[in-house]
Image (cartoon, grey):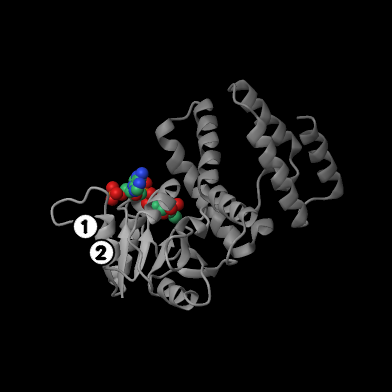
Amino acid sequence: MTHAVIGWGRLARALVPALREAGETVVIGRRLPGEGGLTHAEAARQADWVWLTVPDDHIAATAAALPWRPGQLALHCSGATPLSALAPAPAVAGFHPLKLLAGDAGLAGAHVGIEAGDAHRPALEALALALGLVPLRLPTPMDAPARAAYHAAANLAASGVLAVLAEAQSLWAAAGLAGADALPALAPLTRGALDTALARGLTGAVSGPVARGDAGVLARHRQALAAAGLPEDLLLALAQRQLALAQAGGRLSETQVTALRAHLGKA
Ligand SMILES: NC(=O)c1ccc[n+]([C@@H]2O[C@H](COP(=O)([O-])OP(=O)(O)OC[C@H]3O[C@@H](n4cnc5c(N)ncnc54)[C@H](OP(=O)(O)O)[C@@H]3O)[C@@H](O)[C@H]2O)c1
């Protein structure tokens, strides 16, 4: 079987070597192919499976411009885009790696959301395993609210964490500490929290002043934000969620919960 990968971006640069290592034949189609390269149409004509690894907003237009023939399968790797974007193709599927790809990051180890009918799901699940991915069966077709919730979950788990770290970096600077040390010092805390959560679940992993019922420490955190001229909305929203986790884990007495709620309610 031959694969055409349309668009040479971050996802393609991880997918193509993985496909080739798994023994698959791959051709690449580019908008501006260099010497000896292939256009989108030239690559697609050679392929059984055509992967549209272009920006989400350009999947539909790119699919519409390809010369489809019976028997081909069109795939995209977007968690946010409905399969209808691939509509001109004779068959369609989604293969969405749950991984933030940048630099040399490979695909292996990630889960991959697979949205496909019975005709293609088994082959896609087998390919996922061959690429070192963990196949995750998505409802097919996935309705718009479910897709939005699924994609929001993935985004929160990746870039949402980066936004939290950016806030932590600002507080680090407010403490007068060297900015260059912030991420190397803070990121291992994030990794440790994740490792603990994977081992014990979120409710078993949550720690810090909220999980301990230390309302006084939380108050001083809020004062630090005010002194630094930083908004407290993120800290308070996260404290509310940590309180819910600590409560669900049976970590706090009713008195502590009431005290923390009263404190957070003053926001
Ligand atoms: N990056 C990730 O972490 C990640 C993770 C999971 C899923 N995905 C999904 O993978 C797909 C590709 O994302 P990506 O991050 O690889 O994007 P990207 O790095 O921006 O690359 C997309 C490629 O598409 C081509 N392209 C750019 N503008 C285009 C246009 N207007 N029309 C047609 N082609 C265009 C370019 O390749 P040429 O110059 O070769 O034409 C570009 O390198 C998206 O659906 C995304 O949601 C990405």
Residue 102, percent from left and from top: 37, 50
Quadrant (top left/top right/bottom left/bottom right) for the N terminus: bottom left
Q: Secondary structure at mark 2?
A: strand
Q: Secondary structure at mark 1?
A: loop
Between tags 2 and 1, which lies in front? 1
Residue 36 in which image quadrant = bottom left
Question: In front here: 126 or 215?
Answer: 126
As drawn, is 101 to the left or to the right of 17? right
As drawn, is 72 to the left or to the right of 37? right
Q: Number of numbered discs present?
A: 2
Question: In front here: 71 or 138?
Answer: 71
Q: Which residue is mark 1?
A: 38
Q: Is mark 2 within 8 Å of ligand 1?
A: no
Q: CA distance from mark 2 to mark 1?
A: 8 Å
Name the residue type under label 1.
Leu
Query: Which residue does the image show at 48% across and 49% down from the upper left?
Result: 188
Q: Work out whether residue 101 can be spotted.
A: no
Residue 31, percent from left and from top: 27, 49
Question: In front here: 191 or 156?
Answer: 156
As drawn, is 123 to the left or to the right of 80? left
Query: Which residue does the image show at 23% across and 47% down from the upper left?
Result: 32
Residue 129, percent from left and from top: 43, 74
Residue 261 in which image quadrant = top right
Residue 258, percent from left and from top: 85, 42
Which disc number belongs to residue 52? none
The answer to whether the residues at label 2 and label 1 have Cβ atoms under 8 Å apart is yes
Q: Earlier in the sequence, mark 2 or mark 1?
A: 2
